[in-house]
DNA sequence: TGATGACTTGATGAATTCATCATATCGATG
DNA sequence: CATCGATATGATGAATTCATCAAGTCATCA
């Protein structure tokens, strides 16, 4: 956790978002969210993400350093979990925001395609959002 | 807005969080949140943040590029606003998370100080969180 | 004790972001 | 048109993050 006790909250917030600012780390957090209530050992994260072990470890270290996850070692196994339910909420709201915004873009694209002329540029229906959820659901 | 239509959602999410990953940008978003319903020209952001004009402009450009804010130019004035209410929610949840976590740290510190012995290391009550909200409230 | 599985850390070059100054653009006005 | 206020962009070096490989640590077991 960012431990400079005198830092303004907006700096700490920014630091939190830095911790979330990488695709692999989002994937990890989504897997942890989906696994809530069950143990989530590194081996599971390795299988789900498909990352190489040292690469995943580096990202897990970043998540730990930013206070986003917690880890518990039991013998050979280290189990990870979200540090707080708010993390899952952040991801959920980000999802809402992005889907709303992408949907808006899609609608704007369809509206533009509905305009007369301008040399039909192709089927806009197939130009919709190709973003999928990455299997976290 | 990140416009690669084929990107997985976790990549787009990470990109969104990148946009939020700087203190100055958090400050801007907090000011926009507090100003909701009113116009928020750059001049107001300049005054509130105390940043130099070109520095603020760079950050605003980043926020625009990440789709987090929208801007409208009217004559000499450019007015900014949040691109979506979800942005304010993200900040609110981040705040909840951080205050919970800092509070937890504070409690753990107090608990440690309540433990017997270990050469009283000072008044833990004054070691509480010094993080303040940066005036966004 | 050595070997092995599980996981982490160290090191380093590439890529990106940040900080900051110089310059440019936009719109209004005399 | 030149000037000015408001705002944005370009450029560049420093700092940080990312990607990736090598090596290390922890715990178990024969």
Image (tube, coloured by chain):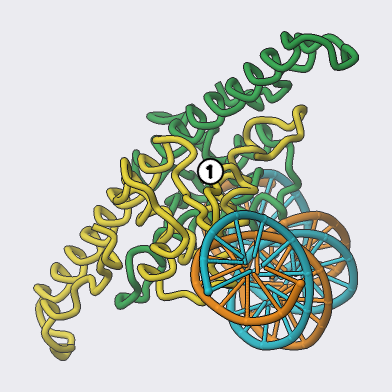
Chain colours: A yellow, B green, C orange, D cyan
Q: Position of residue D24 (x, y in %)?
A: 78, 69
Instruction: Identify whether A111 is placed above or below B118.
Output: below
Residue in the image at 43% along x and 41% along y:
A87
- Front residue of B27/A65: it is A65
Q: Is residue A50 left or right of residue A68?
A: left
Q: Is residue B66 visible?
A: no
Q: Position of residue A41 (x, y in %)?
A: 44, 56
Image quadrant in which the N terminus of chain A is located: top right
Q: Circle 1 sits in a helix, a strand or a loop, which is it?
A: strand
Residue bearing mark 1: A70
* Number of residue marks: 1
Q: Position of residue B96 (x, y in %)?
A: 48, 27
Instruction: Identify whether A65 is placed above or below B99.
Output: below
Location of residue A115 by image quarter = bottom left
Crowd tier of the residue under label 1, counting other residues whose Cα lies within 10 Å: few below 14, some 14–19, many 20 or above: some
- Front residue of A10/C21: it is A10
Q: Is residue A130 visible?
A: yes
Please report, as a chain letter, where disc 1 is located: A
Image quadrant in which the C terminus of chain A is located: bottom left
- Front residue of A89/A39: it is A39
Q: Is residue B3 left or right of residue B77?
A: left
Location of residue B51 by image quarter = top right
- Front residue of A113/A27: it is A27
Q: Position of residue B8 (x, y in %)?
A: 33, 70
Residue in the image at 36% along x and 76% along y:
B4
Residue in the image at 65% along x and 44% along y:
B24
Residue in the image at 32% along x and 46% along y:
A38
Instruction: Identify whether B31 is placed above or below B65.
Output: above
């Amino acid at each position: 956790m960012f431990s400079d006790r005198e830092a303004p909250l907006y700096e700490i917030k920014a630091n939190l978002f830095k911790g979330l600012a990488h695709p692999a780390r989002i994937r990890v957090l989504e897997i942890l969210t989906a696994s809530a209530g069950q143990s989530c050992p590194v081996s599971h994260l390795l299988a789900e993400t498909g990352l190489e072990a040292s690469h995943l470890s580096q990202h897990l270290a970043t998540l730990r350093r930013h206070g986003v996850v917690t880890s518990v070692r039991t013998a050979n196994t280290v189990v990870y979990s979200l540090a707080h339910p708010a993390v899952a909420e952040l991801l959920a709201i980000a999802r809402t925001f992005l889907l709303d915004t992408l949907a808006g873009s899609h609608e704007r694209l369809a509206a533009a395609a509905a305009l007369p002329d301008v040399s039909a540029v192709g089927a806009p229906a197939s130009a919709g959002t190709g973003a999928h959820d990455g299997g976290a659901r």
